[in-house]
Image (cartoon, rainbow, N blue to C red):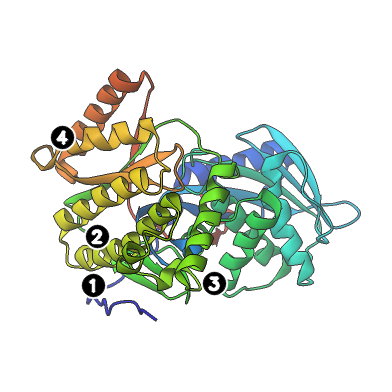
Amino acid sequence: MTSLPDITSSWAPAPAEPAPGVAVRTAARVFFERFGTAPRWLAVAPGRVNLIGEHTDYNGGYVLPLAIDRHVVIAAAPARGDGARLRAYSAALDQSVDIRLDGSEPPGEPAWANYLRGVVRAFGERGLIAGSIDAAIVSDLPLGGGLSSSAALEVATATLLEEATGATLDPQDKARLCRQAEHDFAGVPCGVMDQVASVIGDAAGALLIDCRSGDVRVIPFADPGVSVLICNTNMKHALADSAYARRVTECAEASRRLGVSSLRDATPAMVESANGTLDAVVARRARHVTTENMRTLAAATHLEAREFAEVGHLMYASHRSLRDDFEVSSAELDALVDIAREIGPAGGVLGARMTGGGFGGCTVTLVRTDCVAAVANTLTIEYRKRTGLTATTFVSRPARGAHVLDPLTVV
């Protein structure tokens, strides 16, 4: 079994940062407008961007995400009424749902509420049933952008239910609970990366996660000279579509053919030697996962050493593998990565790749901080020229994981 490298640092963790004031204040305001009273709780969960390590999590491998300072915020308070029910309003969709809190609610419509239903079911099965709750949901995460808005909604819901029931879940258990909710209620056979990043995110840096053992190490990333630029293609992805599930099946088939329990236990050399016996598509999927695990461990080492150019090279290699071997990129994602590469180190770009499950969504680019504005401008202009679409960009620092704020402290 391969273990995580011994990555240590003398840097002190950065202070925990609160959620962005705008999202929190908006959630509190929406709750008041909807329910006529102030909220008691503000449950906050961040999205994430994955620097490297894509489609390795459900193969028991390594990932290197960081929680970002874009969040789902749920403002809530105990409610009057018979029975234990969650009455939740989504500000983004202008829709309301009424969910039984005893865990008896099946999946249903509207589909976005299945993320809530799945978490509620898991709490109900554990006997953790709150009294009735009114809730207003606000998010500044782009829906379908590959930045884990669904995981953030699940984690924010679990964080709210912890407060409402008085329970405190183990962070890893909480992440697994939310992942299972996505499996059972949204039909997405995802790994645990998104939920772990949202639960355990650290303002000090990225998380090197061993998705088999659950081991998590914080890799400091606090260099003011380098920024993480996220660029949204504004082409939404849909991970419940058959393409994602097919990749999971193909990886399982590769493991079976290679005689290992998961592709975490395979190596590129094993895949190469089995090339004649593996279906060509399955071989490509296995080659991506086995090489991506190696790239992720190497990137963590270089990031800790502030060797950002080397991290950037690995990001480009990751994108090529996702495009050619795993076939989950898109013309829009490729265009943004190509533009970033053309800008190059002379223009401040150190590396770029698609991030998230693929088939649309966002890219992540390492950029010298003094060049961020110029790079974002060039990416936006050139992307429109090549695709006819409008990209949106923002910079994020590492963020704190899920937490609850006291509404009285929110100005």
Q: Do the residues labelled 1 and 2 touch (CB within 8 Å)?
A: yes
Q: Mark 4 points at which residue?
A: 343
* Amino acid type for the residue under numbered disc 2: Ala
* Amino acid type for the residue under numbered disc 4: Ile
Q: What element carries label 4?
A: helix
Q: Name the residue under label 1.
A: 11
Q: What element carries label 2?
A: loop
Q: Which of marks 3 and 4 is nearer the N terminus?
A: 3
Q: Earlier in the sequence, mark 3 or mark 2?
A: 3
Q: Is mark 3 on a helix, strand or loop?
A: helix
Please report the residue visible at 70 percent of the width from the left and 48 percent of the height from the top: 114
Above or below residue 10? Residue 66 is above
Q: Position of residue 70 (x, y in %)?
A: 45, 46
Q: Name the residue under label 2.
A: 222
The local crowd at label 4, few if under 14, some if 14 to 19, many if 20 or more residues have their Cα within 10 Å, is some
Viewer-nearest of discs 3 and 4 = 4
Please report the residue visible at 46 percent of the width from the left and 31 percent of the height from the top: 235
The local crowd at label 2, few if under 14, some if 14 to 19, many if 20 or more residues have their Cα within 10 Å, is some
